[in-house]
Image: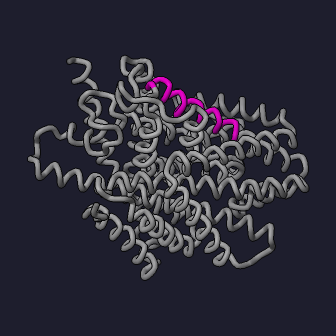
Amino acid sequence: MKHSISSLEKTALAICLTVALIAVVLPNLMTEQVQPMISKALAHIGSGFFLLINFLLFAVIILAFSPLGTRKIGGENARIEYSNFGWFAMLFAAGMGSGLVFWGVAEPALHSLSPPLKQSLYPDRLASSLALTLVNWGAHAWALYAVFAIVLGGLTQYSGKSGDMCAPVMSAIGNKVDKQGQLTLCFVVKLIAVFAIFFGVVGTIANSTLLISKGVELELNITSPALIGSLIVGVLFIIYTVSAKFGIRRGVQSLSIFNVILAFTLLIWLLCVVPIAPIIQIALDGTGYYIQLLVTGTWQFDSQLNNSDWANRWTYNYYFWWLAWGPFVGVFLARISQGRAVWQFVLAVVCIPTVVTIIWFSAFSGAAIEWDKLNQSGILLAIKDDYSQGLFVFFHQLGWQGTVFIWASLLLLLVFVATSADSAILVIKQLVERENSQGITLYAWCLALFLCSYVLLLQHDELLNRSVAILGALPFLIIFILQLVGFLKEFVRDLCK
């Protein structure tokens, strides 16, 4: 059997490595040209995209109760492959586990210092900061992932096989192009999807490495961030390469289960150490404001903010990051959710992770803010100065248990990033490799991810990391809209048959 590399794979690897090379040779080009260009794009299309996600959130919930709700991901003959716990662990780890660790303390605390929401509408500073964080990390983000998986889940007679990135696009354009045009279009769709996936994960690896590096520096009193960052990216490379080589069941699932157990152990232990009453109060008040935002505020989001430009830097930036992750998380979820009914899938992918997100942010940020208020320990001042150190400054207040929390959090973040990377690599290979390929380029993709992440890490710029992460999402937005149109056509056609 020949071990050939497809032209799509060659092109995709070449583009990704070329962008990394440009970043090395012309680093100012990224910070002075590309980053402002992305910011301008967000300012023009961010609010419109945000409204689209609002519609999709409510649409996916309605879909769960529609005639499609009883259908199975992967088709009626699909069978469940993974246990409920293993399935949930994989979808949560692939979706955004690393982000919860990175921002668990920092984001609500940072917003509470200078509330972006108008206090005339949301007078409680802590509750409004949590609610706004949940807008960025809650149901909207998970609904976007769910929509991707449903669109690519092979649910209708005309959808093509599960995970087919091109079928909904072909359905949207109908018979407007000939056979050769369809092949070319499919090539472009997959190429842009790979580009979005690759750089979405690259930005995440670079961002998470900044936090891990900061923690190691503070704990070991080492002042060599470049060396520490290099070692961390190298360790990540080894973990996600081995995991990807072992595949989903032995690699990705095993890491995901380990990490979810570690995450909940850390959460429960923290709740046993800090006062729980303030956390419950912040959770209840913040959830109340969050529901208010979901029902009314997010439909006129700019009017809820003291400065509408804030949304471009935070909420809209996040949402395009989720869009960049959408192709790989969607394909991955469609792959591991075979045999699950749509209603069960929506419950597990949208509702349960949103509840976990509320609990996580309430516990970590609520505990840190309350501790700082009672003890004047400087946590909020440290976050204002450098939000990447907030987690560690807080844990340092907790004695020996805080030391355990710090190292457990760093391990948690490391493995969460690795599970996102290995899932992305497996999806990229599914998109680009030939049928007779034996995975000979798995190591090439792992190495490319390592090199690009390392190049970005050297810039030591969190905002740049976020900009790179959404670099591929902007062109992919057109494909996503076509996929939605195609899926709706298939769904209507299937119901009318």
- How many labels, in total? 0
* Residue at 66%, 78% in the rendered image: 227
Image coordinates of residue 418 in percent, x first then y, are 57, 57
Q: Is residue 186 above or below residue 31?
A: above
The kind of secondary structure the magenta stretch mainly shows is helix
What range is drawn magenta here? Answer: 341-360
Q: Nearer the viewer, residue 461 or 410?
A: 410
Q: Is residue 189 left or right of residue 391?
A: left
Screen quadrant of the C terminus: top left
Whether residue 422 is visible to the viewer of this picture, yes or no, is yes
> In front here: 58 or 338?
338
The image position of residue 292, as x and y in percent, is 58, 28
In the rendered view, tell whether residue 34 sits above or below residue 48.
below
Coloring applied to the structure? one colour
Farthest residue in the front direction? 1
Pinpoint residue 251: horizontal percent, then vertical percent. 55, 51
Q: Is residue 335 magenta?
A: no
Vertical side of 61 occupied by 236: above or below: below
Was residue 345 drawn as part of the magenta stretch in this picture? yes
